[in-house]
Image: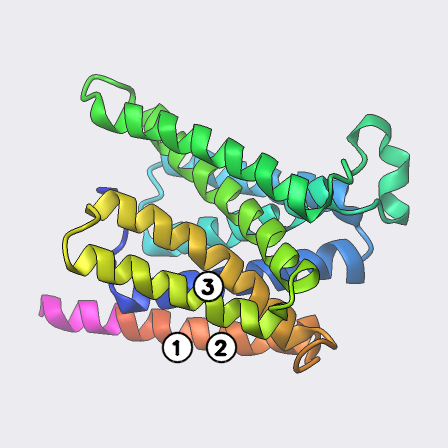
Amino acid sequence: MNNLPKINYKYWSMILLCTTMGELIGNLLSRNFQLGYTLGAIIDICIFSFFIFGVLFFKFKNDFFYWLLILMGNIGGTNLADWVTLEPLDNDKKWGLLKPLQLGTTTGSLAVLGTLFLVLFLWKITNREQNQSKLLNTILYWFAILISSTFGTTSGDFITNDTPLGALGGSIFLIFLLAIVYLLFKYKKLNQGSCYWLALVLMHPIGATIGNYVSKPIGLNLGNIYTNLVMIILFAIIYLQNKYSLSKAAI
């Protein structure tokens, strides 16, 4: 966690906006632009991997690239989650063995959560060992971001569609769980690393349920495009305000 931006309420606000935008942009690409879940996931993950390559070998350390990676991880995670859980769209049927797995939100969420635990376990091991490659540690961190985003969409869709909570109730319930994580950290019941990953894992389904509520007929029904425009404006305001505060503090 040494290369992360300063972790404060602005960081978590931008994480939440990125997870919501990732959910909406992923749906926009796969459904509105009719790329399908398979092609959408392949394109997003390739772009995501390209920027990881840039971070590792060309030393892209600017905050801009960090947030670009976070957003691309959330877009890719959304399409990957749909590929794992949903029935294929028209453009998916030509992919043969690569067409969607159709596991459903319950089985799909459990499968993705198991993968996430494995990746975090490996990341923890490499983070502890001082002689381990920083290259592997960084790759595992970003892979965990991608998988946690995937879990966010599968679990967010499960809460929205398969529980009585729905999108709004699910968002409130998940925010309540997030508050518990914060209190556990505040009263020193959780260390910083555990708190960070628990909060991050909860942020993803919160972003998914909020995205579902704001954009779909079950909620405000603003649609993917208009909701994304609002999210982009909010993100830009917080990001630029944060950059201004840091530059002013450095004077």
Q: Which residues are magenta?
A: 243-251
Q: Give the color scheme: rainbow, by chain, secondary structure or one colour.
A: rainbow
Q: What secondary structure is marked by label 1?
A: helix
- Residue shown at 44% from the left, 58% from the top: 203
The amino acid marked with disc number 1 is: Ile
Label 1 neighbourhood size at 10 Å, few (<14), some (14-19), many (20+)? few
Q: In the rendered image, which residue does mark 3 sit on? A: 174
Single out the residue that lies furthest toward the top.
Answer: 131
What percent of the width, then of the height, locates residue 111?
Answer: 60, 35
Q: Which mark is residue 25?
A: none
The mark lying in front, picked from 3 and 2, is: 3
Magenta includes 35? Answer: no
| Nearest the eye: 221 or 69 | 221
Task: For marks 2 and 1, give the CA distance.
Answer: 6 Å
Is 151 placed left or right of 37 in the picture? Answer: left
> Which amino acid type corresponds to the residue marked 2 in the rendered image?
Ile
Q: Disc 3 residue type?
A: Leu
Kindly report which numbered mark, 1 or 3, lies closer to the viewer in this rendering: 3
Mark found first going from the N terminus, 3 or 2: 3
Judge the density around disc 3: few (<14), some (14-19), many (≥20) Cα neighbours within 10 Å.
many
Q: What residue did someone put label 1 on?
A: 237
Q: Quadrant of residue 199?
A: bottom left
Where residue 8 sits in the image (x, y, percent)?
24, 64
